[in-house]
Each structure stands twice: as C-alpha cells, then as structure tokens.
Amino acid sequence: MKDELKIRVVKGPDGVEFEVEPLKDYYCEAAPTVMPAAYIKVVEDLFNWARSESIWILGFGTGCGAIEMRPLMTPRFDAYRFGVQWRPTPRQANLFVISGYLSTKTLKRAIRSYEQMQNPKYVIGLGSCTINGGMYWDSYNTIKRLDDYLPVDLYIAGCMPRPEALLAGFQDMKKLIRAGKAEGANLYAENFEWYKANQKRVIHDWDMPDYNW
Amino acid sequence: MTQNAPFFTPDRSQYPAKKADGTLDIDIASGKYLKLWQGPNHPGITGNMSVELTVCGDEVVEGKTHVGYLHRGFEKLMERRTFIQCFPIVCRICVPEPDFNEYCYAAAVEELAGIKSPERADWIRALILEMGRINSYMMYLGGQAGALGLGVIGQWTTYARDLMLDRFEELTGARIYHMFIMPGGVRDGLPEGFDKRMEETLREVESTLKDVYDVMFCNAVFKKRTVGVGYIDPALVDSYGITGPNARAAGVAKDVRKDQPYLIYSQLDFEPVLGQDSDIFTRADVRRRDVLVSVDLVRQILAKMPRTGPLMATVPNVLHWKIPRGETYIRGECSRGEYGYYLVTDGSGYPRRVNVRGPSYTHAVSLLERMIVNLNISDVASLMVSLHTYPPEIER
Amino acid sequence: MRELHTKLKSLFPVGDLTEQRSNLGFVTVPQEHLRAVLVHLRDREGFTHLVLLTAVDWLEAGQFQLTYLLSNRTAGKDLGVRVMLARDGATMQSIHDVWPTAATYQRELREMFGIDFPGSPRLHEEFILEGWNDIPPYRRDFDTLKYAQENYSERPGRVTHDPAAHMKQKLNSGGN
Amino acid sequence: MSVRDLLSPFAAWKNLFRDPVTIIDPLNDRPGAPRYRGFHQNDMDKCIGCGTCETICQNGAIDMLPVDGIETKQGDSGLRPRIDYGRCCWCALCVDVCMTKSLTMSNAYTWVESDPDAFRFTPGVDKKHWDNAELGYHRPEEHQLMAKVRLPMGEMEPETRIESFAEIVNGYTIEQARLEADRCVSCGLCVATCPAHMSVPDYIAAVRDGDYERGLKLLYETNPFSGICGSVCTHKCETTCAARHDGDPIAIRWLKRHIMDQVTFEQCRDIVGGPRPATGKKVAIIGAGPAGLTAAFDLAKLGHSVTVYEAFDKPGGMTRWGIPEYRLPYARIDQDIDVIRSVGVDIRCNVRIGKDILLDELHNSYDAVLLALGLQLGRATRIPGSEHENVRKAVDLLRQATAFEDFGPPRQAVVIGGGNVAMDIARTIARLQKKEFGRVQVTLTALEDLAHFLADPDEVKEAGEEGVVILDSRGPRQVVIENGQVTGLKTWHVKAIFDEQGRFAPSYDETDEQMHAGSMVIEAIGQMTDVSILGDTLTEKLTWNRGRLQVDAGGRTSEPWLWASGDMVRGPDVVSAVADGHRVAQSIHEMIAETEQPK
Amino acid sequence: MTQFDEGMAHGMERLRSKTTVQEILEVATGFEESARNFYRDLIPKVSKQIRYLVEELADEEQAHFDLFASLAQRTDIADQVKIEIERTASDSKFSDCLHLPNLGEQPDDQAVLQYAMGREHAAMQHYGELAETAPAGPIRELFQYLASEETKHKLELEKIYYATIHRGGGV
C-alpha cells in the first residue's frame, strides 16, 4: 500500500490531532444499486428522451481512439449539434467512451472514473481492442474483452473508428437509450460481485475501495 | 498578498528541506504539503499519463511523471511477429504522428536485410513524414493554446489538421494509422489530382497559421503566461537528451534532417528553425515556424519527386523473411525531436529486439520532473504541452 | 569511425568494431571499463548525446547486452557501446551522474529486464507496470501470449482449420 | 507586450463572416476514399481457401472455416476466411498477400453493434451492405510482396542436347532453389493433389533453410522414388498451387529434385535406416516398377521378407524402360532402387511369371502376392496398313533404345500420339537420327489440339525445339504402303475432340486429308497391361471392373491372397504408382497382422 | 464387306418393300434383336476382363429393341419421330478410319469395339440411304429417325473407343 493511503495521524491548525484513514473516510462503501424505471411508462420515456438528447461524454482518452474525438469537438464534425458534448469530470458525464485497448493500469482508473459517474450512465467500446483484444491480443498488459470488467452498451468496430463512425455510434446509443435498452449501469449493479472479481483478477495492485461514487 | 499573512513564510524556497542524502524531505503528514495528481483523467494533461505533484501552496515542490497507462508491450509483441507482421503494429506507438514508426522500422529492416527502397518511394515517404509533421504541430498548437484557455485555436487547427487527414486518407487509405510505408517501399503512388488538393490544403494551413499568429502569438494573455516561463538551459540539452524544437528553441540547431540527412532531405532546400529564449513562447513559435517550413517542404517534394518508377523493392517472400544477425539504429526528425528505432536481428524470421526511442521519453520524464519544480500549478499543463510529449512513445 | 576505434583501443581493452554504416558503429566494452569509456567519449570525442540505453536478452548465451548509443552531432556519427552482462543476477554500474536522463532508462531496464543499477535514483519505483507479478516481461523467457491467455479471457467461439489437413480429410479419407 | 497584443486577438471575429466548415450530414456525406481500407469483401468465385491471409494476420483475426455450398476440391480447400473485427487492425496485409486477389476491402467503415459477438463475419458469405462497393482498397498491380515468376531451370540448348542422351536439365543451384522455395506460401493445397500426399510445404521449407537432411527425411516418409519423381513426376501438385493464380506455380518437382541432388546415396541409405527385425512373413511382388518397389520398401521396413520378381534384366519398370535417358538418367533410377534394396528387398530380375516360375507357386510359398505389372503393352490404331512390320509401337522401341538394341532408326519417321510417350519416342528417334544421319526428320501427329495435349507443355515445347514437327488435330487414317514399304501416314483433320458434355469424342473432317512421309510409323497411343500371366483359370476367378482388376481400397483383389497395384489398376503415373504401393503395402501388412493376432 | 454387312444389306432390301411405319419398325426391331443375340453369344468367348464391354453392347441393343418395340405400340409414332429427327445426330466419321476386324475366337476389347462401331456405321448408312430414296412423309421420317438412333449409338461407342484405346493408360 502506498504511503499516502495508510492510516495516519494529522495535526490540525488548532493543534488537535486526529486520525485520517484515506481509504475508508473519503468514499462511500455502499455497493451500487439498480435504478428502477419510473412507475409510469410515459414518464420513463420522457426521461429516456431527455437522456438520449444530452449525451455528455467523459473526456478521458484511455487509448488511441481518443484522437478521433478532437475532430468531433470541433466545427467540422460538430457533435454538439447532436446533443453530444465532452465533460472534464466523471461527475458531470453520463457516457464513458473507452477509446480502445485498456492496459491494466488504465483499467483501474477507468473503473474508478466509471464508478464516479452518476446514474444513468453508459459505456461505449470503441475499436476492435475493446471487443476481443484487437491487435494487442497477445499482450501481457492489456485486457482482451471489455465486457468482463465494465458493462458495455455499444461497440463500434474499427482500428480506429472514424469520427463519422463515432457519430453513428452516438446516434445508435441514443436509440438504445430511448428504447430503454441501455441498461449497462443496472447490469453492473446486479452483477457487481462478478465484475469486481474479474477486475481484481487482473488488477494486481488493488489499492482502492471496491466502490465509490 | 502573502506579506500580511503571518501564517506563511514569504521565502518559499526553503521548502522542501533536503535530507542528508540530498533527497527532498517531504513529510505529507506535516500538513505543509499536498499531493496533487494531474491525470490521467484530467483536462490539463497531454494524453493518458499523469504527473504526481507535491505542492506547497500553489507551488510545485516535486513532480513525478507516471506513465504506463498506454503500455502494450510493443517491443515484446514485435519479438513474436515476423518482420512484415511488425509493420502494422509499429504505427500504434505514436497516435498523432505514426508515420515515423513506419519509416524508422522499415528503414531499419531494409538496412539489415540489405534492401534499398526505390527512389520514388523515398520521396513519397518524405512527403508523408512532412504531412504528419504538419498534423502533429497543428495538434500541438491547439493544445498549447488550450492549456491556457485559448480554446478557439484548437477549433481552427483541428479543422486544418482534418483537411490534411483527408489528404492522408486519399493517399494512404486511412486517416490516422496509415500503414503505408512498409519494409521495401510504399504501397502505392499518389492518386490522381492529389497535388491540386494538397495545394488547397496547404493554403488552408497557412491561412490558419496566420490567424493563429494573430490570435495566439500576438496575444497579451498568452505572452504573459508563456514568455520567460519554462526555461530550458541550453546546457541541459545534451545531458538530458533534449532534441527537436525543444533544443532548437534553446538555440541548438539539432535537426536530424540536416545533421544526418535521410531519405531525400539532402535534395531539399530548408534551414532548421531556431529560437533563443528557450521558454514556452519560443518553443511554440519555433513549432509554428516549423509548420511553415514543412508546408514549403511538401511543395518542394511535390515539385521535385519522380512520378514514375517502382514503389517497392523486391523483397523476399514476406511469409518467411529471415534477416541475418545484426543491429542498427535508424533515426528521423519527428515533430518532437529525434525518433529512432534500434533493431537487433539474430538470423531468424523475428526481430530479436526492437527498441523505440521516442523523444518524449526524456522530455516527459527526466526533463519534466526537473523543470516542474518551483512552478505554479496553473503553469504545469502549459509546460507539459510545451515539451510536446506523447505518452505512448514513452512506455510503448 | 576506424580512427576513433583505434584511439579507443589504445586506451581501453575494447573489442572489434562493427561498422554498420559509415556513420554508425558498435563496439563491445568490458563491463568495468564502461564508465571510463563513456566519459572519455563524452568529454574528449564529442559524443555528448546519449541517444538511448537499452538491453538485448541473449537467453541462449545466458547474457544481457546493454547498448549505450551515443551520438556526436557535429561529426554526424553514432557509436553503440555494448556491454555483455551475465544474465543471472545482472548488475551494472549506474551512469545517471554522467547523463541524468540515464536514470529513466535504468529504471525501465530494472523493471522490464530485471537488471540492477545500484545507486540509480528511484530505481525500485514502478515505472510502466503496476502490480506486476511475473518475471520481467522483456526477458526472452517470458511468454507474453501464454501470460495473456492465462490472465485475460478471450471471446470464445473461435475455431480454425488447416487447409491441407482439411483437404486431406475431405478428399482423401477412406484411403482412396 | 504592445497594444497590438491586446488588439490582435480580436482578429478572430472575422470568422463570423466565413462560411461554416461543418459537414451537414457527416453520416452520409463522407464515403471513404477510393483507396480506403474499410470492411472486407471476398470474391467467392476466386477464393481458393489457401489460408495465406490467416498466416499473415498478425492479429490472429482470421479463421478458415468450411462454408455451406462450397465444396472442397482439388486446388480449393473449401474453407473461407472469417474475420474477427474484434481483432482486425485494417492493415490489409491479408489483401496484399491474397494469392487470388479475391480478398479486397471496401470503403465502408461504419459498424455499430450492441452484441460484441456480431463482429465476426465471413466476407462474401455473410451478406453485408458493402458487398458490392466498388471503391476501397484493392492490391495495386505492382504492389507485390512475393515473387510472381518461377526461377528458370537451366537446361541444355536444343542444338547441344539433340547430340546425345545426356540429361537436359541442370537442376537448381542452391541459391536458385532457395529463391524458388522462398516463393512458396506453405498453404498446403498441393498436398491433397499429390497422389502420395508428400509433405510439399515442409520439404520446400527445408530447402529454404538449406536443411537437406530434414528435406530428405520428409521425402522418404512418403516417397522412396523421390529421385525419379524429382525428374519425371507429372507434378499435378503444381496445377493446384496457389501461386499459379497470380504468377507461376512453385517448381515443386524441381525443388524435390534439388534435395535429391544435394544428398548422397549414403545419406539416403542412413535415413531409411537399413533392414528391420524380421517378422518371418513373406511377400512376393511381381514387377519391379514404382508401385511394386514402393510396396516392397514399406513391407521390408515393417520387417517382412520381400521378394520382387522382374521379367526384364533390370528393375525400375516403366521409369527405366519407358522414359528416355535424357529425361531420367539411369544412375538416378539405380540409386533410388539401391536405397530400396538397402532395407532388405530382394529383387530377382529376368524371372518371367508363367515361364520361369508359376503364379501358383508364389501363391503357395508366400503369405501374399502383389501384382504390379504396369502397362507394358502398346495399343495399336489398327488403321489400314498398321499391320506392316515398320509400323511399330512406341513402348517397344523405347525399351529397345534403353537396352541399346539397334532397331534401325528410320531416316524419316511419323509418330501417332500426343502424350508423353509420343514425345519420348519422337525425341529418342530424333537423337538417333541426328547421330546416324545428321538430321532430324520426325513428324508427330496427334488427335488432340495443342491446348489439350496429354503431354506436358514443356515436353511439347522441347520436342519442337529439337526439330520434331508437331501436327495437332490430325486423326490417323491410313498407313500408306507402296511396294511393300511404308511411305507415310495419311491423316484427317480433327474438328473437335470434346462433345458438348466435355467427353472425348473426336470428330473428323475427311475433306482435309494430309500425307506425312516416313519410312516408319510409330504408334504411341494407349497402353495396357499384359494380364496373360494370370492364366485363364485365375482370370475367370477374379472379379473385374471395366477391363481392370477389381480391387478394394487397399488394392486387394477378389482373391484374398492377391493384391494388385500401380498402373494396371490406377492409370499411369509414377507418383500415383508410389501412392498405390503405399496403400497396398498397408493393406498387406494389416492382413498379415490380422492373421498373427489369434496367437 | 463382312458377313454382317451383307446380311444387313439384304435385310435392308426387305425394308424397302415395307409401306407402313409399323411394319418397318417391326423389321428394325428384329435387327436389334439379332444384334443383341450376337453379342450375347459373344460374351463367353471373350476374356473375362473385357466381358463387361460385350455385355454393355448387348444391353444397348436390348435397349434399342425395347425402344422400337414400345414405339411400334404407339399411335402417334409419326409425331414422336418428327420431334426426334429435328435433333438428328451427325456423324463424326471417327470410326471410318478403322478397319473392320475379324472377330476371331478370342477377340480383344479393341476388336469388339471396332466391330460394334462398324455395325452401327453400316446400319446408319443403310437407314440413311433408305431415307433418301423413300418418298417424303412418315416413312422417310422414320428412316431418318432410325439412322439417327444408330448414329447416336455409334458416337457413344466412339467415345468409349477413344477413351479406351487412345487415352487408356496413354500419357
């Protein structure tokens, strides 16, 4: 365990000493819960419509594919007109685009980022490597199938997919959300143990709480 | 404002104290210091990497570069791929400017296998490398401005870069990973009407650069934040292995294209762009002017290149291509500095060892860690961008 | 290149010169003389730029080859200085004080090859890998495919056929 | 810092007056470039399932799978590549190495799916919207990752070779062989075509590596007649070679020969490893041709005592008596046979069944008897005049030539036939004429047109170079005899050799009659087996199938003690005979093992 | 001329005097019958090895016999025949180049084939001549039909002959 994650005693400006336990104090330990649909279908549909029209992407470029997001953020492809925008922090985002392969080191950060995102939230796997390892199929440091570790709603094939393909993916994502089929976050909550077991199998340096939001 | 606050000591340079062995004495528990992680999920970071900052107030007292988030083990993977199978994988080592990987790898294989790529292929290779350089710099300019809040620059440069990607697409068949320069030559010649469309694109790049000059370089805010900040002592250039615009901005005329001309660069007319002040502003300006050089080089190449002739040398059957034992190093001047491939072969059908020397390796780790000390937190992103680092070439 | 080699040879017990190109040569130096050779090259011969430092695993010979590639920009020449190390318990003196940037290379070599450089700063901090639990991955005896298959699940359902075997079975079964 | 630095940034406002650069409909307005490497297409008619794409794919993205409706046949494995887009990196190396240029890439690039398992597809089989896209990456014509052209085999000039019976071809040098071997993609399509299923890609790899011991070992695993086959094999394998779709097929036969050229007799002998512990079982084999001797070799290696009876004074069968020396030097036959002898095979020459020893005797004193008689008898055309004594059969003349008997070569000869035997005799006569009269006067008439000659194209070409006049599409009409002497052959033009169903059905045009002068007419048409040694009783007892002995898959006849193999049951071809020899040996061995079992 | 050729010529003369389609067919059927009997008698004489060939020839004649016999039963023979002769087979003249062999006591396959081809050839020619001399109408058409049938059979034999003699083992 890293030094800064150990329990330590800190003296405050008022001279009072107190104990700080980083892993325990700063995070909620409660596991994620399934988010039920609204009682009335019309209301749920309305919610889903609203969600689908405000896809806020977490600006975390986890791999190569991130480079094709820049053109989307700029005037030529202009994804904003489709209700898609990028946010710098997980708290403000509802779509996590895993842009390609994930090394185990990034997987750890990606999981934390995903868990910090607010419900409802979605994941898109971008490129071949998220589907079956892609060209890093024999690498010792990258995961091969993303859906073992995070609930993926949609995949876009390509190495890397072009901005147009990404846009098509966002459009499909909208359709899924509107149809109420983008249930990845609930899947994650339902199968939390399974996901955690998978994650811990490959992340050897597990110096973080199991879940935090 | 700190004068009136007795809580802080005005002379911040006494922090951190040094231990007897010379290492910094940073006791987090003392409450004087704070750990601040910039990245990997952070808008002010150059790609998927992170810097672990120890700050005292808003001043960085220690910075540690953390890389490996993009580590795929290329050098290991290549050891179990045949020489031709390595060709598609190398470009993935650097996303914004992948072609140097293709070129250096191909040239290394050719040298050890005793193959000479045809002249026409060399011209096309140089064309691609210069196009990639323009792209890389355009991205950099957007990033450098963005790191200081000048979002509009990125909007413009990304558009210009995208036009260049269109040229890449029609020439190579792909936007980002071109996989066009293969051991032995290149895949194909220029498509019909390429020159004309290229000229239009170059004009757009030039006009964008003019706007960038007006809005970014002649901008009081930008100057205020960059002039005199992030100074690299020219004396550090060799001891820290600094190359490319980072060295040239410090007045050291390091440019592989001139020092050890490769491909057809000896037949082109250009001078390395130099700067004197070695700060963030100068580095940005050197790169801006370097784009103009590249634009000119692309024009020269298109005017001078042969239009007929073979594009591929005769290579052995690629399925069982064996290369005798040997080792070599091939370098090229990429937008960030010296890019090189060290290739060792052992007579089998697979490379014995490939080592990729990316310029960011020294820039983003040892150099950044040295320069980041005593910097204001708000300048960290700007400094990092000004070193123009791409993490995948560090960890590969 | 030849002149330089002759000069070096008169000063140090260096091996033969491998001239790869007119401006690139490789020379093997005994482990204990490396530092002196490097300092000499840097201070007297103008090889001021450490281009890279890396290792090659000659598993069969039980050796690591360390390659210190130096460049003399004004002369436009490169010299690769090779050091052969015993693979078991490989240890090499650190040159981080000759070139500060070497510390990073040494950290990487420590992590990826398991070569020790006593005295090199932050040598034992993780550099690229995180929580690595196997032999250093760049060693030749580390099988990346095997590791990947054991640690990461692949999408099932892939099966292939060898054309020759398939044809033999389809066309020639029954000894006909 | 100046005032300019404060004002200049406002230049950005000018963009208010610029046309927007935004693409209105990015999903439809942006087709991939003409060279774009998008999703795969595969032309099912061209694809041969060689799997080279799978071999080169560094991502392991391609599987070769059987596909409904695509049959496995010679030269087409029936497998088709299925691509996993969870692996593909669109490098197009698979397109670059595709042997038939069937695999291409379209310029389509959008594929979004919720189901991660949906990204596997067999292009050309699983219908996709880009199947008919015309744009996209196709391998440029000059972009070639493998050599297309076969290394030419060095051979004697026609003027020189016609002077003697010296072997024509030189064989590859090591360097040439390596370059030729380098062209092979090791797909293995040829293995099924080779009757003996020789491990072609593996021994070619051995040539590439210069490891001739390994190559030799591989050769002897499947073919004890490798020396002979290296010279005269019909190399059907080369007709299914993947390389022939875009360039020349690999010179498989010459590479085999090259291995044999590089090794000594002692190495061959050591590889096969001498006689094995005896089982005490005895097998008699009649006929020391390739089929008989292959069976003998196999059986001897299994420890059985094998005696081969040969009617002529030297073993080798048709390889010796039918093939002229300039194609196959006798020393090469001797070496192959000596290796076979070295495992303990006893070859008794000059023993004629029915005359020197009776078949019944063999039946009584051996555990099994194998007939490997070959096709020793030439067929006659039986056209008018063909009974004349100067109308000869090619097989007979070739035999005489081998035995150095003088049969009085004619000053002018006409050969009937378009097969290799016809070429052999024409070229043999040509050499004899050259020696005796100083000039070549041989006319060869064949029913078939040049495109359908049974002879190897090389043979036809070389015969022409040596001065043999080759007339195709000529049907023999009559041997012209004047004053008791043959003066030539009359032929009619053959209009067509195939009927609508593609069956052989020559049809004549009697208005086009030609006369070919010659004092000897040589018939080189079909051949048949001399089955008279079986005797009437056995002939009646045996089951026959359309003129040939009825045998099971292992070559066993309806008589449990008697097997038959080689040309007499299979049709003529050295390597087929070898393959048959193996099968029969296996069958005989199984029978012997079965009878052992009860003990 | 061989014995069968003469015999056939004589039989053909008999046909010339017939005036109805049924009558002609009856005679033609008789020819087929005698041919069949000839081959059946030959079977035991040839070596077992090639017996299949003679058996096939006998079967073939039997098939013709059956065909003509059934045709004779029909009332619409004329129409049937007409349809057939529109597809008249043309002679390839291949077997013209062969002698008629003397079928000795133990003929070989080549001799049997040559004999059979000769026989079909003669029949074809005779029917052809008859067709030419007969007045236009159903009778001529019937002769044309018969000539065509024999030609077809002959062509079939030629194929077998080529495959056996010219290709048989010949490389």
Image: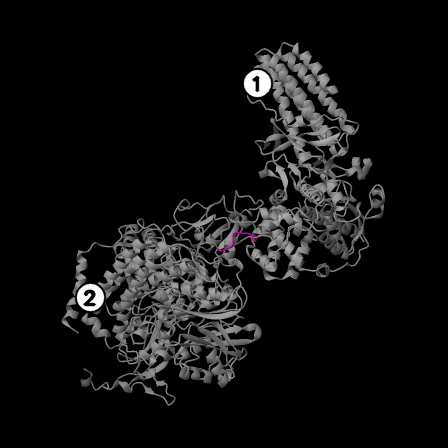
Give whichever of A79, A174 is nearer the camera: A79
Judging by the rendered image, the residue that carries numbered circle 1 is E80
| Residue D147 sits inside the magenta stretch | yes
- Quadrant the C terminus of chain A occupies: bottom left
Disc 2/disc 1 C-alpha distance (Å): 98 Å
Judging by the rendered image, the residue that carries numbered circle 2 is B214
Give the side of residue D376 with respect to residue B195, left or right. Answer: right
Residue pictured at 22% horizontal, 54% vertical? D20
Please report, as a chain letter, where disc 2 is located.
B
Q: Residue furthest front?
A: D438
Please report, as a chain letter, where disc 1 is located.
E
Q: Callout 2 environment at 10 Å: few (<14), some (14 to 19), or many (20+)?
A: some
Give the side of residue B71 with respect to residue D11, left or right. Answer: right
| Residue A190 sits inside the magenta stretch | no
Q: Give the magenta range.
A: D145-151
Residue pictured at 32% horizontal, 69% vertical? B46
Q: Is residue B166 above or below residue C104?
A: above
Image coords of residue D345 (percent x, y): 78, 54
Amino acid type of the residue that numbered disc 1 sits on in the rendered structure: Gln
- Element type at mark 2: helix
Q: Callout 1 environment at 10 Å: few (<14), some (14 to 19), or many (20+)?
A: some
Q: Residue furthest bottom?
A: B20
Image coords of residue D421 (percent x, y): 68, 41
Q: Are marks 2 and 1 on the same chain?
A: no
Q: Main secondary structure of the magenta part?
A: loop
Q: Nearer the viewer, mark 2 or mark 1?
A: 2
Amino acid type of the residue that numbered disc 2 sits on in the rendered structure: Asp
Residue pictured at 19% horizontal, 69% vertical? B218
